[in-house]
């Protein structure tokens, strides 16, 4: 069989003009290239700051030129090791000359993802070992939320070194970042297919074991899969590794905006081997296919999607995408028609309704500035419209479990695990 053409952009930055220097990012950028090279023949495009600084102009040129040169590749991988931060609703990768008070001196992950997608390459992978230290507590604590959301919408499989509000650690004993060390170890074990599902849990376990051994705080890698069909797809060989499981299990998480649905979806994917699907990703995909539409997402759904008896259109899109999976957590149904279509499918569905007080949810929305950026009045209007769509009726569904999310994340996830009977 013909070997697939795989390209990798690998960037590692240790030295910063305006931020604290790091120890092993440059060498990790080399190790990741070597690890992929042990699996297959690759075309590597590298920039680390061992020889010369990695300025924003240099990094931007590398990304853009490689994207243009990779149009005939089967797969394109982007790896970054260094500082990362979140500000004004976007995630940024810091270059040697980045000043976090001037966002024009950093590369947004929006820009990286756009360039990868522009290449036209079929299989796109983003590997981010950022947030190695908090560059500023006010801007680094939610890095990854925006990137995960945009990657799902754009069809880019993404591996994050840590979950939002965590830091990705370096360890001198390893001469490496803990995540990159664990990732390369898995890549060097050729018995493990390079599929998102096969890598997700071993990455978590390896990083957790190293952190525990060295008495370090929690670091939990996170994998965002898009499209869902690629959860068991080997991103190097192009082969599908479907698990032959008769029972098809779905956890359906519903509730109002910012109640914590995605948080639990990510947790179940991280800790219990579920494939995480966001129904909003399928809505955004439809919107992206109509660039001339003028209006917000709510307008689009009401005027373009939920017409002519198609109130369950997003649910049908989602079901098609997960047909090769056996264990999924789906977040974000907005209409009863969507619930009915899902429950009438071949899946064994367990439904959970998440609720939080309006003010709690508004404060969470403010924390993720840039995602919506709504005033309190605008938030209430959006809320009421979605309740009218059917969210209010979902809480009264037969056999649905109701969970209140107004305490710590730990207590929230424990409550869900108790219901599902899947506590570690």
Image (cartoon, rainbow, N blue to C red):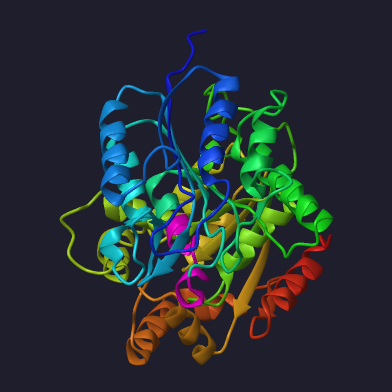
Q: Which residue is more in the foreground, 75 or 27? A: 27
Residue 232 x, y percent position in the rendering: 61, 35
Q: Which residues are magenta?
A: 136-149
Q: Which residue is more in the foreground, 67 or 105? A: 105
Is residue 146 found inside the magenta-colored segment of the image? Answer: yes
Residue 11 x, y percent position in the rendering: 44, 41
Q: Is residue 120 above or below residue 284?
A: above
Q: Which residue is located at x 50 percent, y 91 percent?
A: 359
Q: Which residue is more in the foreground, 88 or 405? A: 88
Residue 2 x, y percent position in the rendering: 48, 9
Q: Is residue 347 visible?
A: no
Q: Is residue 393 left or right of residue 89?
A: right
Label the magenta part by its dominant secondary structure: helix
Q: Is residue 87 left or right of residue 291?
A: right
Q: Is residue 126 above or below residue 379?
A: above
Is residue 424 found inside the magenta-colored segment of the image? Answer: no
Q: Is residue 258 above or below residue 69?
A: below
Q: Which residue is located at x 67 percent, y 37 percent?
A: 198
Q: Is residue 404 left or right of residue 118?
A: right
Q: Is residue 332 visible?
A: yes
């Amino acid at each position: 069989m013909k070997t697939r053409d795989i390209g990798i952009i690998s960037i590692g930055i240790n030295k910063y003009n305006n931020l604290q220097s790091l120890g092993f990012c440059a060498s990790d950028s080399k190790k990741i290239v070597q690890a992929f090279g042990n699996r297959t023949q690759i075309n590597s495009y590298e920039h680390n700051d061992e020889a010369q600084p990695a300025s924003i102009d240099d990094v931007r040129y590398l990304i853009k030129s490689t994207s243009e040169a990779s149009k005939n590749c089967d797969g394109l991988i982007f790896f970054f090791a260094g500082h990362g931060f979140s500000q004004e609703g976007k995630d940024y990768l810091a270059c040697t000359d980045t000043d976090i008070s001037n966002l024009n001196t950093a590369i947004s992950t929006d820009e990286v993802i756009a360039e990868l997608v522009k290449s036209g390459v079929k299989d796109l992978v983003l590997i981010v070992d950022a947030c190695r230290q908090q560059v500023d507590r006010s801007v680094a604590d939610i890095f990854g939320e925006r990137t995960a959301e945009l990657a799902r919408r754009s069809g880019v499989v993404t591996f994050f070194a840590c979950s939002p509000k965590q830091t990705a650690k370096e360890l001198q004993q390893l001469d490496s970042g803990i995540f990159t060390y664990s990732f390369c170890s898995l890549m060097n074990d050729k018995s493990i297919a390079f599929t998102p599902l096969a890598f997700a849990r071993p990455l978590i376990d390896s990083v957790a074991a190293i952190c525990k051994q060295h008495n370090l705080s929690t670091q939990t890698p996170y994998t965002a899969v898009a499209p869902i069909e690629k959860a068991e797809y080997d991103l190097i060989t192009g082969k599908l590794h479907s698990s032959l499981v008769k029972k098809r299990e779905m956890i359906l998480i519903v509730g109002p905006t910012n109640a914590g649905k995605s948080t639990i979806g990510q947790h179940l994917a991280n800790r219990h081997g579920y494939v995480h699907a966001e129904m909003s990703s399928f809505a955004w995909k439809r919107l992206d296919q109509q660039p001339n539409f003028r209006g917000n997402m709510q307008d689009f759904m009401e005027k373009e999607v939920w017409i002519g008896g198609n109130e369950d259109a997003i649910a049908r899109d989602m079901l098609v995408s997960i047909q090769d999976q056996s264990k999924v957590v789906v977040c974000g149904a907005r209409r009863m028609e969507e619930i009915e279509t899902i429950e009438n499918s071949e899946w064994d569905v367990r439904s959970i309704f998440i609720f939080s007080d309006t003010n709690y949810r508004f404060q969470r929305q403010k924390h993720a500035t840039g995602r919506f950026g709504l005033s309190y009045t605008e938030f209430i209007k959006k809320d009421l419209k979605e309740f009218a769509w059917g969210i209010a009726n979902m809480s009264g569904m037969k056999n649905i479990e109701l969970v209140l999310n107004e305490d710590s994340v730990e207590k929230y996830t424990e409550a869900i695990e108790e219901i599902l009977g899947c506590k570690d």
